[in-house]
Image (tube, helix red, strand yellow):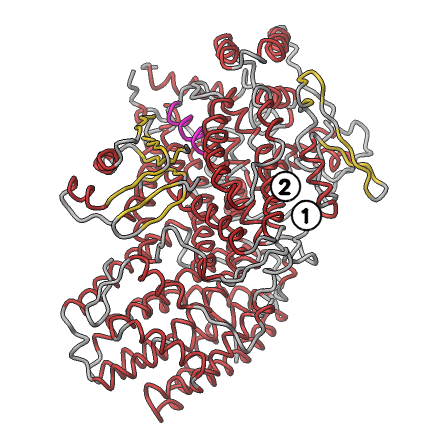
Amino acid sequence: MDMKTSSGKKLGLKEKYRHMTRGLDWETTYQKREDVFPYVAYEGIKIHDWDKWEDPFRLTMDSYWKYQAEKERKLYAIIDAYAQNNGHLNVTDARYLNAIKLFLTGISPLEYMAHRGFTHAGRAFPGSGPRVACLMQALDELRHAQTQIHSLSNYNKYYNGFHDPAHMLQRVWYLSVPRSFFDDAVTAGPFEFMVAIGFSFEYVLTNLLFVPFVSGAAYNGDMGTMTFGFSAQSDEARHMTLGLEIIKFILEQDPDNVPIVQRWIDKWTWRGYRVLTLVGMMMDYMLPKRIMSWKEAWEVYFEQNGGALFKDLSRYGIRPPKWLDQISFDKDHISHQAWATFYQYGAIADFHTWSPTEDELDWLSSKYPDSFDKYYRPRLDYWREQAEQGNRFYNKTLPQLCQTCQIPMVFTEPGDPTKICYREVDYQGEKFHFCSDGCKEIFENEPEKFKQSWLPANQIYQGNCFPDGTDPTVEGFDPVSKVLEYYNIQAGRDNLDFDGSEDQKNFAKWRGMATSNE
Amino acid sequence: MSTVFIALQANEDTRPIIEAIVADNPHAVVNQQPAMVKIDAEDSLVVRRETIEELLGREFDLQELQINLISLSGHLDETDDEMKLYWNA
Amino acid sequence: MQMDLRTVSIQPLRQTYDPVARRFGDKPASRYQEGTYDIQSTANFHYRPTWDPDHEIFDTARTRIVMSDWYAFKDPRQFYYGAYTLARAKQQDAAEANLGFVENHGLVANLDAGLRDRAIALLLPLRHVAWGANLNGASVCAYGYGTAFTQPFIFQAMDHLAIAQYLTRIGLLLGAEETLDKAKESWLADDAWQGLRRYVEDTFVLKDPFELFIAQDVALDGLLYPLVFDTIVNGVFAAEGGTPIALTTQFMTDWFKETRRWADATVKTAATESPENRALIEKWVGHWRDRAAAALQPVAQIAVGDKADALIAEQVEQFNARLAKAGVKV
């Protein structure tokens, strides 16, 4: 909207925004500043002038409502049409749905955590610029959680594994990976939260999450997911500029902030990279029609784009994140190592796994010429043969988990993909285990935090993952079925191989109804 | 040299916007992807309100870009007249 | 191959997500239900907040209100993000039209100068009250428990920011950029505003999210909005030829009418839960109502002079009647 003063002077965007936001706050005098903003000092970040904060988008609430409402109208019109027309039968292949299950259980509840986390951060900062930006993002994140739940609601009606995402996030073994990532960020101080989520996740890594998922959806005929994905991304662009702004702001305020921020960048790039292993697996194995390999996506969105970013930040004395050598070596390996893990533990997951088809294996060989045929294809071939003979392999022993990232210890030594990487630390008379130098160092910097990790495998062994009232001493006690009950995974429907699943049968039947006259 | 980019949904709303960006940034490279257009440019990229308005034949508020924006990289500076993406390095 | 998928009639396996089905049965659910119920984590938190090690990330113990189920709360407007945003966009269109009408027809120039000064003196410092309410909305949303309870508070926070911004526009319409600075000086130094500023600053340090809700959304908003926007702007000012001012504040009038229903429902649900809750709420409401009424008295005086006492008394009476309907006697 145009805005004039009574004298007829027209205000520009910057002036207008200054009046609409900056002039609103004041120094409290009836209550002490440290009581009003109690969480802003303890991380050691020094801010001398909150007004130096630049708001890149300068959005006021009237414009916010206007543009967001337009996005919502478009989005829900498509969701409705997609549901009414049985759009789910248009996806390439029912195996695709498992990628979306992974999204709904692993990502959507985190959007909700982001909503609460940004509300907390916005409340914590005394400056009006960052407060408004954080709270607007907090509102957007609620949007993302809800539009995802609403978009996928129709899938839940027809397919298994979608039925209880928030419950599963808090319990299921592999979901402790994304969950602990966000719990870690939210329990950190507000500045670290902003560097963790606003900068490292939103700015550096979010393209790797959304662009492959969303283009993957478009490639695989899933218009519903494509629509919420793009609609969410349009907010994301705003969030990314906030993430970059917070970093610049903190670094410019005081040179003492640089080493603190550097440690956070190291930590959160590594933490985020570990979580994205799930996305790598999704891209390389779970999309029937592939868009690009994980390795290619990493090169475009992390190496190229992140490279430009860190070059820019070097003038503040910031160097690229630690462990990049290992990350660079691992891009040939992690998606294969992750898929092998989920394939083995397919009995206790809420989505299906399968043996890739011959042409899918060929695609992987061509995308990973240096690693796939040598290290990973023979194992997949073997498992497929076994499955065809009726010996589908399910691993029944719980894996050891990394104390920091909580991923099973399946990653290999930097430079040697034949050797599992183990690290350990003695702390307060206990031994803690890690998958990598990165995770070990993160623990060593904050042992009091990470000794608290709720590790799903350990919790199962301690008897904490059975439904209330379970007696594990009774004759014939079956721990796996009780754990599945605790997870609310419906045995035989949500889990096991895709081949022979209810999803597979229903999809084939319903598609048949659409293409024939029977 | 560092690359900045802007990615927009490919639809009727963005067609003139993309045309305007191309006109104002001869060094930009347009990549058509499924349902999306990604425009890369070395060092900086500018989106001008006037150019878009000429192509649209109506007034345009640069904040309308938000509706169809997918992603971007680089520092951002927005005024009433233009939106600029750039790297300092 | 293009399939005509609409012709396929297939039976769904289930109608909605499990938490919604557990509460309401497996039947088609509303978007409010699917987007609200049980989406906040409650179990197996990994780490304690470094900023509040005595509590979990989400913790019922942050408030003294005790609920057997925090999803007993229900927003009567059934606002999830989409419904909220569409409703506000519509109101924004109306507000924009009103502001544009006043501006384009030069209606401000025709206002009596004395009335205009009183309006500026009354309305402009309220920008800061709304800004404070924005902070408090964020607090309750961040530290409250359960999405059904917390979700409306991010809407409240952003609504208050919008109100602060509408008041800014009104200030620029009635005056100039200096008008905003002068109003801030009043807020910081004039005696008339110090009671209210102290009230607002005291709410900033409240740790109990439910008490903060009572202090901000029930007591302060519950007295301030009907007093300032209904009684003074729409009543007193309009009668003195100030209808253009009333046009510019219509958003606030409509907003309060709408949000009041949500606040009442929230109070009622918590008070009905137990006699302990009710006693606590009655204590909080009584305390903050008395403070708010006292703080608003000199503010009302700016606009209506010695009629302030009578107007405030009338507001308090209506407030008490309103709360009695929500099951709270004060």
- CA gap between label 2 and label 1 equals 8 Å
What residue appears at the point 81 percent right and 36 percent down from the top-left corner?
A: A431
Q: Can residue A212 be found in the magenta stretch?
A: yes
The amino acid pointed to by label 1 is: Tyr
Label pair 2/1, CB-CB below 8 angstroms = yes
Q: Is residue C54 magenta?
A: no
Q: Main secondary structure of the magenta part?
A: helix
In the displayed structure, does residue A474 sit left or right of residue A513? right
Q: Secondary structure at mark 1?
A: loop
* Residue wearing tag 1: C47
As displayed, is residue B23 above or below residue A376?
Answer: below
Q: Chain of mark 1?
A: C
Above or below for A498 versus C258: above
Please give the label number shown on residue A158: none
Q: At x 22% / y 80%, what residue is drawn?
A: C242
Q: Nearer the viewer, residue C329 or C55?
A: C55
In the image: residue C83, left or right of residue C248: right
- Range shown magenta: A210-219
